[in-house]
Every structure is written in structure tokens, then in C-alpha cells.
Amino acid sequence: MRKLGVQEIEDIALGAAVLGTGGGGDPHIGKLMALQAVQQYGPVDLIDVDQVPDDALIVPLAMMGAPTVLIEKIPNGDEFTRVFHALKQYLGKEVYATMPIEAGGVNSMIPVASAARLGIPLVDADGMGRAFPELQMVTFHLGGITATPMAMTDEKGNLIILSTVTNLWTEHLARSATVVMGGSAMIAIYPLTGAQAREWAIRGIVTRTEEIGRTLRLWGRRSGSVRSQAAALRRDLPPVVATMPGGVAGEECAGGASTGRRAGPGEVPEGDVVQALLALTAGYLLFRGKVVDVARRTVGGFARGEALLEGLDEFRGQSMRIHFQNENLIALCDGEVRATVPDLITVLDAETARPITTEGLRYGYRAVVVGMPCDSRWRTPRGLETVGPRYFGYDVDYIPIEQRMAGQRG
Amino acid sequence: MRKLGVQEIEDIALGAAVLGTGGGGDPHIGKLMALQAVQQYGPVDLIDVDQVPDDALIVPLAMMGAPTVLIEKIPNGDEFTRVFHALKQYLGKEVYATMPIEAGGVNSMIPVASAARLGIPLVDADGMGRAFPELQMVTFHLGGITATPMAMTDEKGNLIILSTVTNLWTEHLARSATVVMGGSAMIAIYPLTGAQAREWAIRGIVTRTEEIGRTLRLWGRRSGSVRSQAAALRRDLPPVVATMPGGVAGEECAGGASTGRRAGPGEVPEGDVVQALLALTAGYLLFRGKVVDVARRTVGGFARGEALLEGLDEFRGQSMRIHFQNENLIALCDGEVRATVPDLITVLDAETARPITTEGLRYGYRAVVVGMPCDSRWRTPRGLETVGPRYFGYDVDYIPIEQRMAGQRG
């Protein structure tokens, strides 16, 4: 167990934007809620999933709906406690801890704010290892764990308890209620036991998110207020690199400090931090280029579209097309698929090291595109049926990013 | 207390079609469900609202959604018990009885079927005294009684419990869930105490509905299989006329046996039964004529439209226009308003004495249009705000039908 305070929250929020893969909602508003909650109620206890007794109940909390609405309709905090207590009362059991259902985007922060307010620990795990748009897109679903009973509430005080026959019905009914509630709602969902969480949750994801955020923060600091010390700092690779798990990938990629964009006056190359990020996430540099076209339209509540990038540096002469539906779903380099959902595709601003959401993509951005392998549960038949490229309407087979990148080089 | 068996159910269903004022759903399917339930579980105890102890709980049951869907998606009976027990468990209290929320249309029958299955009495009262399309359109609402907690379920087994901040929010959220559930849902709503029911429910409406149905049945019998006995039977006014409450109106109306459509071979004039109906409901004969035009369109889930009738008999040379939105809402004779919602406007087929729904209105029908005063609670400012003509979008003041008809004659 350790404490999550202000710095940890800042880092988790930044890391969550990476795992948001362009969607999941900008964690900024969520971060403000989490910071306010820990300032008022004290830091949050982050516990390992192994610390939760077998029969003890974990109730994940999340925001459902359009993140854009959240900005105009900021929860006042009562929603957390109302929805939590409603579900607890309906279940008729004590609740041991809360947990995120998704590590990417704004829902990385909602459970932190909730844990602080409710005075319960936060479990270092989630159900996606990234962000996804629908309620059944969690590893719990793959394990046959039902989403309901779930509770949902709005800022006005309306409260709904759902008990459905399938998790897809939960999604349908809760989605429609969210729309009526004004576009966003607070939910308590997938109540699960410690034993279930140990088997089906993605472990250690909060800590990994924090490490990702810390890595980007160091880059941000260098290219920010301490630009003049850039050269000296270049030797200090972020300390997290030494402790990262699964740090075998990345070195095969074309990207690296030596091949990065050449630094202009007062800037530092981003290469070393990108390398640290890739190592930390077992990821790949997919592309480095300039956004030259973005087409988007809102279809069925999703921000659908695609972005076109023209290569820079070692990618000069090549182009990358990214298809997105809230999240980045497919990345193609000169027409060849490099990565698809459920693997993670994230676009970073090369100037600031901040992840760019699909909503935020604009002509002229110099961007670094990274691809990261998803949790292995998503690669099972049931996982791919739930979140594979075909579920999102693309006629593309899922091939793990490791194989695609190896093939591309073979 | 008395028992509701097969004949009572037949009569209530027929009367409910009159109080449905063209909408509320054809009670036919509901009647089949009620008949099946009493055949399987025995007759239902109908109790007076005064027999319910002050603190005892009444849970009304109803169907929500499009009645047309009900025909294709007939409840299998589990819905009644599931939704009832879900709400009971949520409330954590025993339930003494059930009750209709509306006397008109299919929801007259749902609580009869439910009472039989659940083995609890049916209270002889409702919350509308007719049919209305939205959940807040009940006299309970005028009394500040909240619709929630309410429960709703579908035939698949999905279950929702709602707890809302206003009854309008209940309507919005439940309506949207009904759509997702496939267009119809079974609901348990407006849990209220015996004391609340005594103050706000419309008393004796089940019995009154039955009397209306019995009156029409006698007409139907005459013009049906026993047509040859028509002349002899004409002397037998339905016995109910002698016992009806408030039977002062009607005699001033233009319509009457003597002025009715002249009987052709093998037919009987409907005048005497119409007179009995008007006396029973304190109603007025608004028109007698032939349907010459019907325009309808579906707007926002409502069957909106209007029907034009050309006068027959004493109405020859006049025309009547009826505007409807599921229910008949306004009736104008030669452009002059004769009746508006919340007063009741019902169109009867002059050949069969069966009420015609707004969906069923067809060119060529010979029809009798009757207007009946609504419960006095609907005539209060809050009542008219809830169900007056302006709520339905008509720029017409509500004037009680008694005044309109007196004025028309003055």
C-alpha cells in the first residue's frame, strides 16, 4: 500500500492520457476533481489487488457519457457518494474498496476522487488497461462477471439501478439513460469480489500509468521552464526506465534519440523520452510526422474520423493514416497496417510530449505516433470479439503489434 | 369487497375503451391476460379504497409504451411478478394491494391480471379517471406524491429501478428505457399509502368502468345475435341507469332515442343506450355523423392527427373536427370548440357500440361522439397545467364541458 497525493495524481492523469489512445476523455477535469478531493480529505491509499480479501467487495466508479459534456457539467462530488451508497444499499453488503474500470482518460481520475471522498482504498488495477467506449469492453466481461447491479446518477439527483440479463443490455440501457440525464452520468458498476478481481482485473495499471506520466513530465520539464539546461539534462534518463516491466521492446524500432527531430534553439530532442516511454510500455515508434489532414464527423455519438500525417526525419517520404472512433483504432503507414485495436495507438505532440486527443488533432501538429501492446486477455477469441477491429466495423484481422512490427522489418 | 370474474373483466375492458378516449391502448390484449390470470388463479378481490389501512402500501402496476407493440410482444406474466417483487424488495415493505394508474385503455386490465397472479386485492380507484399518455399525468402527481421509487422490466428479464427528483424526470427516463427495451415495459409505480390514495385517487372508477362496459354490452347484444328481438328489447333500458351516480346530464343534449339514427331492417337505434351512457357518465352527445376524412402522422412517438365527420340526423349539415394525439383532445363543431382535454371525448361506432380508437378511425364509419366531464381535480390550475389543452400544444383555454354545452345552447 502506498499513498496517492498531488504529484502522483498529476502523473497518473498524464499517463492516463497516453493510455486513453486519443479518447477516453481528457483527464484534466478529472484531475482537478481528484486534486480537490485529496486536498480536502487527504491522500488515497493505493492497494494491491492481493490485499483485497477473497469475498470482499470492490465497486468500481466511473463517468459515463461524452467527456465534452463533463467540462460543462462538472460533478459536484455528491454524485460519487450517492451512486456508491445506492449500489451498496442495493447489494446489502459492505464495500471494501473502489477501482477504475478503465486506466485511460478521465476515468483514471474519477475513482481517485471517489476513494478520497468515501475514505476507502483504491485498488491498483482496472478492466481495460487503456480506454474503450462501451461498458462491456472490460476484462471482467470476458470472465463472465456481470456489470449489474449497477447504479447511475446525475448532478440533479436522479438515480437509476439496473439489473440486466447481459452486459450488452447494460450498455444499451445505461447509454440511453445517460443521454436523457444530459449526456453524462456517474456510475457504480461491475461490483466484484477480491477473488474475481485477482483473476480478471489488469494488475498494477495505476502504478504503470503513473510511471508513464512521470516519464512524460520529465520531458515536459526539460523542454519547458528549464530549456537552457537541456544539454546537461539529456544525460538523465528518467529513473523509471530502470524499474519498468517488460522493457524488451522499443530497441528494434526505427525511432531513437539519434534519429529524432533535430533540436532547434532552446529545444531538446524528444528521442530519449520516447525511448523511455516505449521501453516502459513495450511499445513501438510507429511514426514521426506532421498532421496534414484531419477529417471527422460525429456518427452515433462517436467522434469518427481519420488523420493523415506526412513523415519527418527517418519517416520522410512516408505517410501515416490513423482511423479513430473516439479512440485511435488503426494506424497505416503507406497503406500497410502497423497497429490495430485492441493494441494501443497514441499520438504525442512532439513539442510538448503531451498526448493529443482525437478531438484535439489539428493541421500542422508535429507528432510522434506510438503503438503499445494491449493486455493479453484482449487477444483471446472472446476478447477480440468484444474489442477487435471487426467489432468497430473494420474489415481487418487483428495481428498483435509485435508481429506486425517484426513482419514490417523482416 | 366483491369478486371480479370473467364477466366483470369483459365489461371493464369494454368500459375502459370508452374511458381510453381513443388512446390508452386497446384493452383487448390486456383482457386476454386478465382472463387467463383469473382462470388460472381465481377471481380478484376488488376492494374500496376505504378498506386499505392508512399506512398500508398500494403499488399500482401498468404497461408503459406503445400499445401496438404489446400486441407483438405479449407479456408472459413473469413481468408482473418480477417488477412487483423488485419494487417491494427495494421499498423493504409489505404491499397490501395493487391498483390501476389509469382506468382507460389497456392499463385497466394489467392490474387485474397482476392482482390475480400476485394474490392481492385490487383497489377500486385510479389516478386518471381516463387515459393519458405520460406518467406525471395522474392525480397523485397533483397531490405531490412521487412516482418513484418505481421499477420497470421487459420480457427478457432486464430490470430497472428509478428514483428521480421530479415526476417529469421519471417520465423522461422511463420513456427512454421503454424504447430501448423494445417499445413496451411493465412498470410498478407511484407506491402510495392507503391515506394518500383516499385523498388523491379517483374512487370507484373500476366499478364505473364496468357499468359503462355493461351498458355497451347490452347494446352490442341487441344489435348482434339477437337482432330479431330488437323491438322487444328496446323497452329494456339497462338496469345500471337506475343506480348511476350524478345522472343529471344528458337530458339537455340534442341526442336521444327519439332523434337517433332511424333503424334499418335488422338493426336497432343506438339512442337509448347512448342516453344510458351519457347519464352514467354525466356526458353529452357531441355529434352523430360519418367519418369523411382522417389525417394522421406519427410525431415524437405520438399518433397525431385529426378526423372530420359530416353530420347525420339532427346534426345534418354540420361537421365535426376531432384533433387527437393518441387520445382525442379537442372536438369542434362547425369550428366551435365543444370539448377539450382533460374532459373526455370518445368516438363510438354507431353500428356496434364499440369505441373506436384514433388508430382505428376510418373513412365511412358512422360514429357517435360523446363528451364526458373529467374528474374535478383536473380542473384545478395544477391539473390544467399538467393535462390542459395548452400542455398538448393547443392555443385553447380549458372551459368545462358543462359550460361549453350550456353556452352552445344559450
Image (tube, coloured by chain):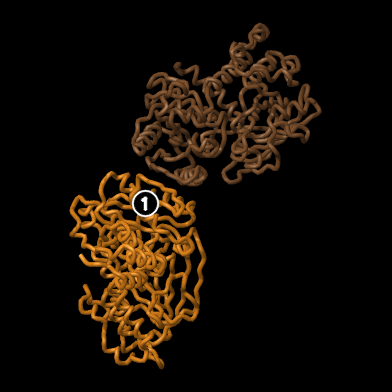
Chain colours: A brown, B orange
In the image, taking residue B50 as reference, residue A377 lies left or right, namely right
Residue B339 vertical position relative to residue A383 in the rendered view, above or below: below
Residue A400 vertical position relative to residue A184 in the rendered view, above or below: above
Q: Where is residue A31 in the image (x, y as percent from the top left)?
A: 49, 25
Q: Where is residue B203 in the image (x, y as percent from the top left)?
A: 23, 63
Q: Give the residue at x 39% y 89%.
A: B267
In the image, taking residue B122 as reference, residue A365 lies left or right, namely right
Image quadrant occupied by the C terminus of chain A: top right
Find numbered disc 1 in the image and state the secondary structure of the residue it sits on.
helix
Image quadrant occupied by the N terminus of chain A: top left
In the image, taking residue B360 as reference, residue A228 lies left or right, namely right
* Residue found at the very far front of the displayed protein: B40
Q: Position of residue B368 (x, y in %)?
A: 38, 79
Q: Position of residue B121 (x, y in %)?
A: 25, 59
* Amino acid at circle 1: Val
In the image, taking residue A353 as reference, residue A66 lies left or right, namely left
Residue B241 vertical position relative to residue B168 in the rendered view, above or below: below
Q: Give the residue at x 65% y 44%.
A: A393
* Residue found at the very far top of the displayed protein: A232
Identify the residue position indicated by label 1 in the image. Answer: B83
Indicate the quadrant where residue B332 lies: bottom left
Query: Within 10 Å of the Cα at label 1, are there few (<14), some (14-19), or many (20+) other Cα atoms?
Result: many
Residue A25 is at least partly visible in this image? yes
Indicate the quadrant where residue A400 lies: top right
Residue A92 vertical position relative to residue A116 in the rendered view, above or below: below
